[in-house]
Image (cartoon, rainbow, N blue to C red):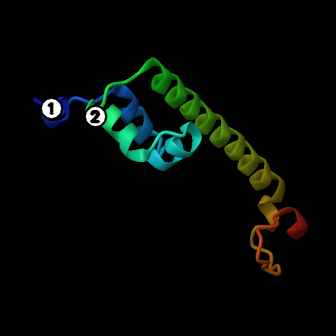
Amino acid sequence: MNPYSDGHVLRIRLFRMKHGITLRELSAQSGITVQRISGIERMEFSLTPRSKERILCALENVVHNRARDTSSAVYDFHSGRERLFDVVVEKEEDDWDAAK
């Protein structure tokens, strides 16, 4: 019997979903295909020690990158709060600092 059909998955799947981390993000960071990661989460594929380490490192990278991005967004928000509704010239690239 496939454990997934019985509702059993690896905890990492719940963690990933709770925090909005996509399979694509993990795949890009780990070098493991989306299908393989999904299958590992659902226990359809065996988890090797190497795959486990690669997925954990990828997850850690995603979490740290998001924390850094969030920290930057909080700083930008607080430093530019009073100017958020100013009219500025929109550019092709997002250049927050030039619009300050």
CA distance for labels 1 and 2:
9 Å
Percent position (x, y) of residue 40? 34, 32
Crowd class of label 2 (few under 14; some 14 to 19; many from 20; radius 10 Å): many
Q: Nearer the viewer, residue 58 or 35?
A: 35
Q: Please report contact status of discs 1 and 2: CB closer than 8 Å, yes or no.
A: yes
- Pointer 1 residue: 2
Q: Report the label total.
A: 2
Q: Amino acid at mark 2?
A: Arg
Residue appearing at x 47%, y 27% in the figure: 51
Q: Measuring 42% from the left and 33% from the top, which residue is drawn there?
A: 15
Q: Earlier in the sequence, mark 1 or mark 2?
A: 1
For the residue labelled by badge 1, is the local secondary structure a helix, a strand or a loop?
Answer: loop
Dot 1, crowdedness within 10 Å: few (<14), some or many (≥20)? few
**Percent x, y of residue 53:** 52, 23
Instruction: From the image, tell me which residue sits under label 2.
Output: 42
Residue at left offset 53%, top offset 28%? 54
Position above or below: 51 against 27? above
Q: In which quadrant of the rendered view does residue 3 lie?
A: top left
For mark 2, give the secondary structure: loop
Q: Is residue 55 left or right of residue 65?
A: left
Q: Is residue 1 left or right of residue 69?
A: left
Quadrant of the image containing the N terminus: top left
Q: Is residue 68 above or below residue 94?
A: above
Q: In the picture, which quadrant includes the C terminus?
A: bottom right
Instruction: Tell me which residue sits at (48%, 43%) in the image.
Output: 21
Residue 65 drawn at (x, y percent): 67, 40
Residue lying at the far left of the rendered structure: 1
Identify the amino acid type marked 1. Asn
